[in-house]
């Protein structure tokens, strides 16, 4: 090739590169008007730098590429392995905040599939630089032994808060603790009911307090709701409205600097695979899926919801979520407590199921007890003098002292 042809080729490449930059910059401006959220301020030099990574180049210099999930011709999709961005491809990550037991692993994988970019956590467990991940999982301030306070001011200006009804999130978190304590694989086993009751009686009130504290923290941290997306776990996993919630997450991620999201028409397919079919969620078996609560537990939960609704009455999204939680808790049948009594002779046990609310006023006067049917038995089996001398003693209520249970790693917790 002569010098004239070489120079002409160089000019064409330069023109192509300039046109690409102009097109990309205009596209960014268009995106800012296409969605209701306010995009973070982006320096023009950053736009040019990111755009350069999109210009076709040799494998040695192509530092900005990553693999998005693939939309297939038949309407299906293929989920690819996410990767952190490299070199000069800088990301403005978001916090993916959730109370422990609220499906954080499922949401983590869903975000990665939408963007093709790795996520991280505030424990630095993945070892990726935060400017090269799309989101970072956190349970702050419910779990505080992390690097959250050091990382937050340096990298983060937006957040997605995943909310789940605590009467379901707290048992899910307890299952994770049980698995860890018993050296079981994560997301495989539900704890026995008797273990749950001990944990509930010692920890439920404290966990409710942490749930309230965490909700307040994130609502106060981002008063500008364009910087905070509320995602109800129950809506994301609902077969009817789940795809709509998934599209809202995709739109929110799309506002981030340096983030590309798969085509909107493919989002429902990604949701179907990772959320609806549970390919990235919990696969726990054994134990009851619905945990019992006392009447007082349910009263405490509803009172907490009302406090949050009163505090943030102006936020219709949060109020709607909390009202749904109140409705769900109101439909839970409180655990029955069985009280055993004796007639005046100390023979013939009976049991009556009562709720915790009814217990204080419950009495068993001997004269009102139903007559017991007496059967003839031999004296050898039931000596009369021992029967009449039977003394009924009050048995103190069993106590379950609160135990210190180690927190589990943030990435191990999900529905």
Image: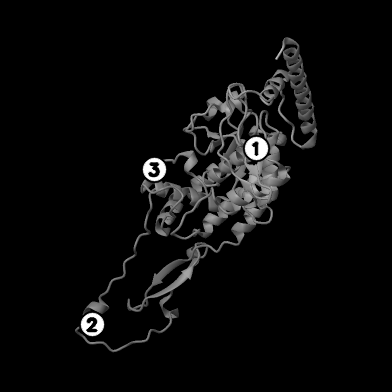
Q: Nearer the viewer, mark 2 or mark 3?
A: 3
Q: Residue reaching furthest top?
A: 3
The residue shown at (69%, 35%) is: 254
| Pointer 2 residue | 384
Q: Are marks 3 and 1 in contact (CB under 8 Å)?
A: no
Task: Please state which of residues 337 and 242 is positioned toward the viewer in this rendering.
Answer: 242
Q: Identify the mark nearer the N-term, 3 or 1.
A: 1
Does residue 87 lie above or below 395 as drawn? above
Q: Earlier in the sequence, mark 2 or mark 3?
A: 2
Most distant residue in the left direction? 380
Q: Nearer the viewer, mark 2 or mark 1?
A: 1
On the image, the x and y values in percent for residue 32 come to 77, 31
Rendered residue at 41%/49% (across/down): 178
Q: CA distance from mark 2 to mark 3?
A: 50 Å
Residue 410 appears at what percent x and percent y?
49, 39
Q: Which element carries disc 1, helix, strand or loop?
A: helix
């Amino acid at each position: 090739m002569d010098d004239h042809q070489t120079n002409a080729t160089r000019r064409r490449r330069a023109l192509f590169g300039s046109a690409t930059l102009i097109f990309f910059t205009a596209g960014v401006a268009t995106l800012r008007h296409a969605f209701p959220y306010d995009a973070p301020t982006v320096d023009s030099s950053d736009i040019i730098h990111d755009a350069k990574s999109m210009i076709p180049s040799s494998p040695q210099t192509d530092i900005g590429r990553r693999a998005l999930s693939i939309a297939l011709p038949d309407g299906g999709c293929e989920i690819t392995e996410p990767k952190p961005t490299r070199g000069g491809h800088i990301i403005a990550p978001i916090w993916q905040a959730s109370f422990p037991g609220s499906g954080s692993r499922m949401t983590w994988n869903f975000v990665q599939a939408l963007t093709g970019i790795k996520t991280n956590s505030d424990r630095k467990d993945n070892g990726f630089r935060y400017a090269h991940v799309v989101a970072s999982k956190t349970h702050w301030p419910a779990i505080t032994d992390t690097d959250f306070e050091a990382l937050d001011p340096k990298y983060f200006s937006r957040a997605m808060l995943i909310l789940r009804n605590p009467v379901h999130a707290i048992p899910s978190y307890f299952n994770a603790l049980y698995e860890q304590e018993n050296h079981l694989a994560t997301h495989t086993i539900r704890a026995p009911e008797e273990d749950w009751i001990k944990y509930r009686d010692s920890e439920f009130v404290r966990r409710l307090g942490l749930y309230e504290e965490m909700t307040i923290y994130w609502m106060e941290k981002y008063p500008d709701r364009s910087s905070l997306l509320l995602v109800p776990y129950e809506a994301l996993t609902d077969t009817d409205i789940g795809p709509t919630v998934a599209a809202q997450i995709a739109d929110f991620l799309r506002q981030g600097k340096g983030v590309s999201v798969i085509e909107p028409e493919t989002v429902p397919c990604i949701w179907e695979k990772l959320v609806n079919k549970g390919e990235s969620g919990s696969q726990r078996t054994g134990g009851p899926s619905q945990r019992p609560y006392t009447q007082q537990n349910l009263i405490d939960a509803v009172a907490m919801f009302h406090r949050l609704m009163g505090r943030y009455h102006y936020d219709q999204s949060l109020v709607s979520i909390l009202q749904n939680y109140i409705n769900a808790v109101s439909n839970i049948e409180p655990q029955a407590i069985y009280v055993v009594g004796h007639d005046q002779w100390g023979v013939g046990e009976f049991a009556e199921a009562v709720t915790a609310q009814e217990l204080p006023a419950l009495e068993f006067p001997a004269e009102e007890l139903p007559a017991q049917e007496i059967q003839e038995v031999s004296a050898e089996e039931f000596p009369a003098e021992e029967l009449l001398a039977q003394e009924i003693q009050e048995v103190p209520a069993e106590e379950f002292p609160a135990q210190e249970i180690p927190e589990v790693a943030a990435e191990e917790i999900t529905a």
